[in-house]
Amino acid sequence: MSGKMNAVVKHHRGPGAELRKVQIPEIGDEEVLIKVKATSICGTDVHIYNWDDWSAGRVHPPYVFGHEFSGEIVKTGEKVINFSIGDYVSAETHLICGHCPQCLTGQYHICENTKIIGVDTQGCFAEYVAIPAANLWRNPEEMPTDIASVQEPMGNAVHTVLNGSVAGKTVAVIGCGPIGVMAVGVAKAAGASQVLAFDLNEYRLNLAGKMGATTVINSAETDPVKRAKELTNGHGVDVVCEMSGHPVAMDQGFKMITNGGRVSILSLPAGPVSLDVTNDIVFKGVQVQGITGRKMYETWQQVSRLLHSGQVDLTPMITHHFPLEDFEKGFQLMNEGNCGKVVLHP
C-alpha cells in the first residue's frame, strides 16, 4: 500500500507535536501493516510531547510517536504465517533482541537491548502502523476498539499488582493516573481485602473509587501513612504499588508497608529518591521489585482474560475520545490530570 496518511509527528526537539501528512509505512517480510482503529495516550507520550529531560536524551525527532493501539491488519509480509489480513490486533510494544542473557532465559520483558515502538521507532499516532508479527496480540472480535487499545498499559498494572500474591491482602496504590486506576481494578479482581488509593487529584481519586477502591485518600488533606495504619490495625499494608514517582509519596509507601510486605515500583522518578533503607526496608524485611513492561506473553494472557471475563471493567477510566486531529486537546487534559485514559481515533 502506498500513499500518504495523517499522523501526529514529534516534529522538533522541543514542546508540542504537529499533525502532518506522511508516507504510509512500508513493511518487511516479518511485519504487518495495521489500519489503526483506536490509539490511546500514555504518560510516556506526554513526556515526549512536553519534551522533558528524559525525552531529550532518548528520542530523535522528527518521527511519528504513540505506542498503544488496536486495529486491523491490511497487509502481511511474505514470512508472516500466524496472522492474516482482516485480523483484529493490538501489540506488545517492546521490541526485543532474542539473544541477550535475559532473553535466553525467557525474561524477555527485561531484554537489555529493548527498543520501544513509538519511542525508538515509528509509532501509531497515525492511520497506519507497521509492526513485527512477533509482537502482535490477537483481540477477541467483540472487544471494543478503545478497550483493546489500552491493554498494553493495563499490562503494566497487571504486572505490578500480580507479581506476588494479593488475595486476601491489603493493597495500596500510590498514584492514580490511568495505570494506577487500572491497578485498583486488578487488585480488587484478584481478591484483595482492601484497596487503598492515594493521590492529590480528586478527579482521579473519584475514578479509583469507580474502579473498586475500598478507600480513597487525598494525601494533601490526610496523612497517608497514618490513615493506612488506621485501616490495617496499626500493622501497615501488605502490598504497595508505587505509581506516582514522587519522592515524598515513595517514602510514604515504604513507611506504610508492613513487615515482610512487598513494594512494587512501576513509576519513574525524575531523579534520585531518599529513603530510610535501614528502618523501612532492611529491618522490615521488605521485598522491593522494579517493574518494567509486561511479561511476554504471560501478562497479555492475564489482561485478555480479566477483560473478557468481565472481572475488570475499564469503561469508567476511559474518559475522553477525540479524532486524531484533535490530539492537542487530549494532551492538554493529560497534563491537567482532568481525565482518565484519552483515546484518539484516526
Image (cartoon, grey):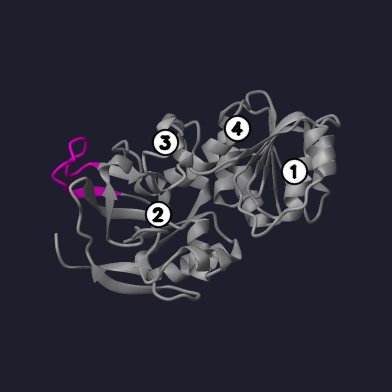
Quarter residue 290 falls in: top right
Residue at mark 1 to residue at mark 3: CA–CA distance: 32 Å
Q: Are marks 4 and 1 in contact (CB under 8 Å)?
A: no
Mark 4 vs mark 3, foreground winner is: 3
Magenta region, residue range: 71-87
Q: Which comes before the other along the chain, label 4 or label 1?
A: 4
Q: Give the camera-side residue of 101 and 185.
A: 101
**Residue nearest the observer in this picture, 34 or 203:** 34
Which is nearer the N-term, disc 2 or disc 4? 2
Q: Tell me the element at label 2.
A: loop
Which of disc 3 and disc 1 is earlier in sequence?
3
Q: Secondary structure at mark 1?
A: helix
Please report the residue visible at 20 percent of the width from the left and 59 percent of the height from the top.
26
- The correct choice, above or below, for 198 with respect to 301 in the image is below
Residue at horizontal 64%, vertical 59%? 270
Q: Secondary structure at mark 3?
A: helix
**Residue pointed to by mark 4:** 188
- First along the sequence among labels 4 and 3: 3
Q: Which mark is residue 103?
A: 3
Q: Report the number of numbered marks.
A: 4
- Three-letter amino acid code of the residue under disc 2: His
**Pointer 3 or 2: first along the chain:** 2
Q: Which is more foreground, mark 2 or mark 4?
A: 2
Task: Name the residue type under label 3.
Answer: Cys
Residue 339, percent from left and from top? 55, 58
Camera-near label (3 vs 2) is: 3
Q: Amino acid at mark 1?
A: Gly
3 within the magenta span: no
- Above or below residue 33? Residue 287 is above
Q: Find residue 314 and report its horizontal and vertical position in percent.
A: 49, 43
